[in-house]
Image (cartoon, helix red, strand yellow):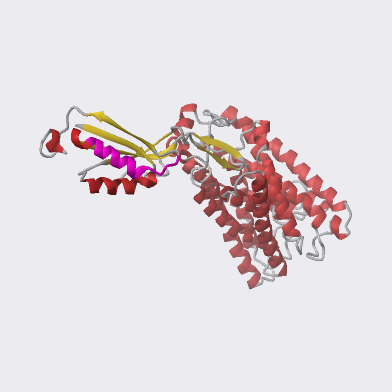
Amino acid sequence: MKIDSGDTAWVLVAAALVLFMTPGLAFFYGGMVRSKNVLGMLMQNFFALGIVSVLWAVVGYSLAFGGTGGWIGNLDFVGLRDAATTYAPGFSGLTVPPLAFMSYQMMFAIITPALITGAIADRMRFSAWVWFIGLWAVLVYSPVAHWVFSPSGWLFKRGALDFAGGTVVHINAGVAALAIVLVLGKRRGWPKHPMPPHSLPLTLIGTGILWFGWFGFNAGSALGANGLAAQALLNTHLAAAAGMIGWLVLEKLRGGHATTLGAASGAVAGLVAITPCAGFVGGLAPLAIGVVAGGLCFLAVSMKFRFGYDDSLDVIGVHLVGGILGSLLLGFFADQSVNAAGRDGVFFGGGWELMGEQLLAVGVTLVFSFAVTWLICVVLKAVLPGGLRVTEDDEEVGLDLTQHSEVGYAMDRS
Amino acid sequence: MKLVTGIIKPFRLDDVKEALKTLGVQGMTVSDVQGFGRQRGHTEVYRGAEYEVDFVPKVRVEVLADDSDADAVAQTIIDAARTGKIGDGKVWMTTVDAVVRVRTGEAGSDAL
């Protein structure tokens, strides 16, 4: 091991930044639900910090990064055995301690299933969510992370590029959101009964935290304090900015107002799309990727009304669509002069070869994640005594009181 | 004894309160309410999805007055609340059978 103190400091800070994204996501979503469900939403996210961290240390890290198999890791690091002294296979060149890498990856494992909470807002039993997120983190996240992030993974070996989690995080969580809402069903009264956000200020605070934390997510994925990290940080920021503009322009052109929720959503769409690209593109590519993502996700969030699935807070419209878009745009914009470990896309003389790998990685993630998530949901629905959903009465009263015996806002009690 | 009730625009409340004080009114009750009249509601848009909001926020002002003062009280509220635009609200008057001041037990006009 040749540990570099600068690299180590940056990766440790980046881990903390990515950790902070999960509370940020909680507020981003929490503001968008009705006030009777705000704690339910915050809790589903905060609890991800609890259960996924434990599972990651016990088994998740080993299944994602242990061993040299193509399809799944192994049990070498179970219970953190040898995890402090041994690099995951393929990562022996790292200049940060193995545990810094393990901890950093843990934060990704936490926020990925937390993204799904936006789709299931207002109607899932908390204990069903606990079962779901535990199973999903182990059965879905770890294998996909292995395929794409581990140098032994079969998609990694084929040459698919994913800098910080376009497939592993956003497509994975986005298509899982589709599978779970198909089993879970719609909120009572949706889409006839209005369910507007109860606190957009909370949503904007959450957006700010996400944007801030995303620097750790993307620039941290350089796994060093270097030029590549700087490139990824700038790309991340520019894509968020362009994403906001792309969303707001379309919103305005469609005869509406420039909304605060639109600004927040557009920025997040840009951040999602740049995630796979952050360390593989340069120049003004992030502006193009961001503005297209903002515009496309604005159009995509209305799909749910056409097809009738209740993706309550648009996990599919933003994370699935944005993740696919970013992963495929990388096939055009990838530029090996930015990162020697990357490849050239269509616009940089690399032909369509990379695009083929990107399409494969996207397609495989879609199929695998959808199928396993659907299976987990169907099984849980059958075996859990209370099923997946709260009762109709409890849904009417709200998750805060029925699931947690608390209320989010007690301002009228003195 | 009359109860004068006004439904007014929230931002007119301060003016109505000052005008009633100037008139010599000793007390009033104010509550936040929502509803619709000819103004109807409004439309809100979240991520492109439009919601019709039928009820708009208003303030209800209630003032107890002697029969002889009631018309002046009502007119004061009307003048102070008026903006001339749709949604200014309504004022009405109802007859009150009895009023008692809780602390002293005074009744009728003495309780105002």
Residue drawn at x 71%, y 46% is A296
Q: Nearer the viewer, residue B76 or A386?
A: B76
B75 drawn magenta: yes
Q: Nearer the viewer, residue A195 or A276?
A: A195
Give the magenta part as a residue range.
B70-85
In the rendered picture of this protein, how many numbered marks are placed on residues? 0
Residue drawn at x 33%, y 48% is B15
Residue A68 location (% of width, % of height)? 76, 53
Work out whether A390 lies above or below A91. Answer: above
Residue drawn at x 75%, y 56% is A288
Decide whether the magenta segment is chiefly helix, strand or loop.
Answer: helix
Q: Is residue B54 left or right of residue A182?
A: left
Residue A385 location (% of width, % of height)? 52, 28
Residue A37 location (% of width, % of height)? 48, 39
Residue drawn at x 67%, y 50% is A249
Q: Is residue A82 visible?
A: no
A165 drawn magenta: no
Query: The N terminus of chain A lies in which quarter of the figure?
Result: bottom right
